[in-house]
Image (tube, rainbow, N blue to C red):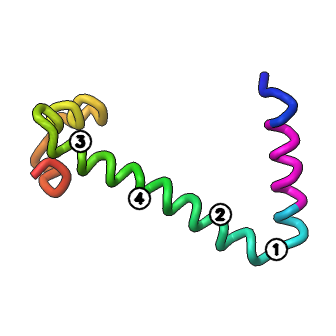
Amino acid sequence: MRDKSHMEQVERWAIFVREHPTEWKKIHTEFINAQFQKANEFIERLAQQPGGKEKIKKLYNITNPEAYKKLLG
C-alpha cells in the first residue's frame, strides 16, 4: 500500500487540474515528453557501449534486429 504522502500528492494534483483546466495539460505533456526523451537518450548511449546493442536486444526481447535498424545500427 502506498504511503500517506503519495495520496497527498495525488490530491494536490487533482486540485491543480480542477483549478487550471488548460494549463495542466501543457505541464503534463512536457513531463511525459521529457521522460521519453531521457529514455531515448539512455538507449542511444547504451547502444554505443561495448555489448550495448546486445543488451538492448535482451532488454526489449528483440528477436528480429532487422526491424530495429535505426535503433541498433
Q: Amino acid at mark 4?
A: Gln
Q: Amino acid at mark 2?
A: His
Gap in angstroms between the C-alphas marked 2 and 4: 14 Å
Q: Residues within 10 Å of mark 1 (few under 14, many from 20)?
A: few
Q: Residues within 10 Å of mark 3 (few under 14, many from 20)?
A: some
Q: Earlier in the sequence, mark 3 or mark 1?
A: 1
Q: Earlier in the sequence, mark 1 or mark 2?
A: 1
- Label of residue 46 in the image: 3
Query: For the stretch drawn in magenta, what is the main secondary structure?
Result: helix
Residue 10 forms part of the magenta stretch: yes
Residue nearer the viewer, 48 or 67: 48
Callout 2: SS = helix
Q: Identify the residue position indicated by label 1 in the image.
A: 21
At 41% from the left and 58% from the top, the residue drawn is: 37
Q: Amino acid at mark 3?
A: Leu
Q: Which residues are magenta?
A: 6-15
Compared to 30, does 59 lie above or below? above
Q: Amino acid at mark 1?
A: Pro
Q: Quadrant of residue 6?
A: top right
Callout 3: SS = helix
x, y (%) of residue 66? 10, 48
- Do tag 1 and tag 2 residues touch (Cβ < 8 Å)? no
- Label of residue 37 in the image: 4
Q: Is residue 51 left or right of residue 7?
A: left
At 39% from the left and 49% from the top, the residue drawn is: 39
Q: Residues within 10 Å of mark 2 (few under 14, many from 20)?
A: few
View extreme (bottom): residue: 22
